[in-house]
């Protein structure tokens, strides 16, 4: 009897049970998600910042719609077998909207969804967050997200608070504990300022914690081994691939402008392999001869 394959949420749950800190490069399209998988990373996150940049060339200030994120996300999930977590922003409305957002991301193939407590329209957590919703609304969002999970969506809930920047560490920790009590699967304190704050979050609020390793952001960049010592299970790298891609494309364009071919490129055969040309040709060969052929 053929074993039943695990669903995306089940694969994510399995990953979260273990020791150490999992490195989670964040993707911004189907190609970047495939490269993450081929490099051997066990999971990814669809970064709202990176999607807004790649799809719209606009800042992460709540300009992308849930429809755009779902459309983009389906392509990402279909390109890989590793679990991918979605950026659900504020849930795109009231608790009813939050429930529908979580359900729709689950149907799109995501293993989990992040919901945060910023006041809409939200913005990148390292670019000066000044406002979050009141406690009651923040709690209602996560409660609705957990209810959607338990009602059949299945997607794990990553509960994020931006209250550290808006209201201070004590309020952020209160919210993190409330989210944990509601049954959130992954806890996300955005923008702690130093190692002591990072360690305190993990110590004071037991659970699966994610550290946001944003180059140039407000939180210190630490190696996965050190993050594991502090109590983190996931290290997210939200903009590393996007920033590296922009740097590489800029260098290539400068070379072309100077009349040269860019020096650093993958060869055509490698690119074809990444995109699946050979697998495509093998698939067509299966249908080249009719059943019971000549």
Image (cartoon, rainbow, N blue to C red):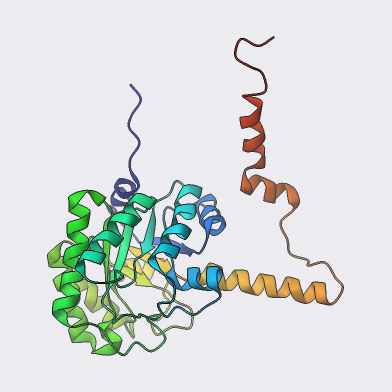
Residue at the image position 40 percent from the left and 83 percent from the top: 126
Percent coordinates x, y for residue 192 in the rendering:
31, 82
In the figure, 132 relative to 157: above or below?
below
Q: Where 42 falls versus 280 (above or below)?
A: below
Location of residue 193 with respect to 19 vertically, above or below: below
Q: Quadrant of residue 57?
A: bottom right
In the visual, does 40 lie left or right of 177? right
Quarter-wise, where is residue 180 in the image? bottom left
Pick out the residue farthest to the right.
259
Question: Is 99 on the left-hand or right-hand side of 65?
Answer: left
Left/right placement of residue 187 relative to residue 215 reads left
Location of the C terminus (image quadrant): top right
Q: Quadrant of the N terminus?
A: top left
Residue 232 shows in the view: no
| Residue 170 visible, this angle | yes
Give the image location of residue 151, x and y in percent. Answer: 18, 51
Q: Position of residue 190 (x, y in %)?
A: 32, 78
Residue drawn at x 31%, y 70% as measured from the top left: 92
Could you tell me which residue is drawn at 35 percent across and 63 percent down?
Answer: 234
> Where residue 115 appears, x then y in whole percent?
28, 68
- What is the count of numbered marks? 0
Residue at 27% over, 59% down? 100
Viewer-nearest residue: 249 or 102: 102
Please indicate whether residue 280 sits to the left or right of residue 193 in the image.
right
């Amino acid at each position: 009897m053929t074993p039943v394959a695990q669903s995306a949420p089940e694969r994510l749950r399995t990953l979260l049970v273990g020791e150490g800190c999992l490195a989670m490069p964040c993707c911004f399209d189907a190609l970047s998600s495939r490269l993450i998988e081929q490099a051997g990373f066990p999971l990814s996150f669809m970064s709202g910042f990176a999607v807004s940049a790649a799809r719209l060339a606009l800042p992460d200030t709540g300009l992308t719609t849930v429809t755009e994120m779902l459309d983009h996300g389906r392509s990402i999930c279909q390109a890989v077998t590793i679990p991918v977590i979605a950026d659900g922003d504020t849930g795109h409305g009231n608790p009813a909207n939050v429930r529908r957002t979580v359900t729709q991301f689950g149907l799109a193939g995501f293993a989990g969804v992040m919901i945060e407590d910023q006041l809409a329209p939200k913005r990148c957590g390292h670019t000066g967050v000044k406002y979050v919703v009141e406690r009651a609304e923040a709690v209602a969002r996560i409660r609705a997200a957990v209810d959607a999970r338990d009602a059949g969506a299945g997607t794990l809930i990553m509960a994020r608070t931006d209250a550290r920047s808006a209201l201070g560490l004590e309020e952020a920790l209160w919210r993190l504990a409330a989210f944990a009590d509601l049954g959130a699967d992954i806890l996300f304190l955005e923008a702690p300022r130093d190692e002591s704050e990072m360690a305190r979050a993990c110590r004071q609020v037991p659970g699966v914690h994610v550290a946001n390793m944003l180059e140039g952001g407000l939180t210190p960049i630490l190696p996965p081994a050190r993050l594991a010592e502090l109590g983190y299970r996931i290290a997210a790298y939200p903009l590393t691939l996007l920033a590296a891609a922009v740097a590489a494309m800029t260098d290539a364009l400068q070379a072309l402008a100077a009349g040269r071919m860019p020096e650093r490129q993958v060869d055509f055969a490698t690119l074809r392999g990444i995109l699946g040309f050979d697998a495509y040709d093998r698939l067509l060969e299966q249908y080249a001869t009719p059943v019971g052929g000549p």
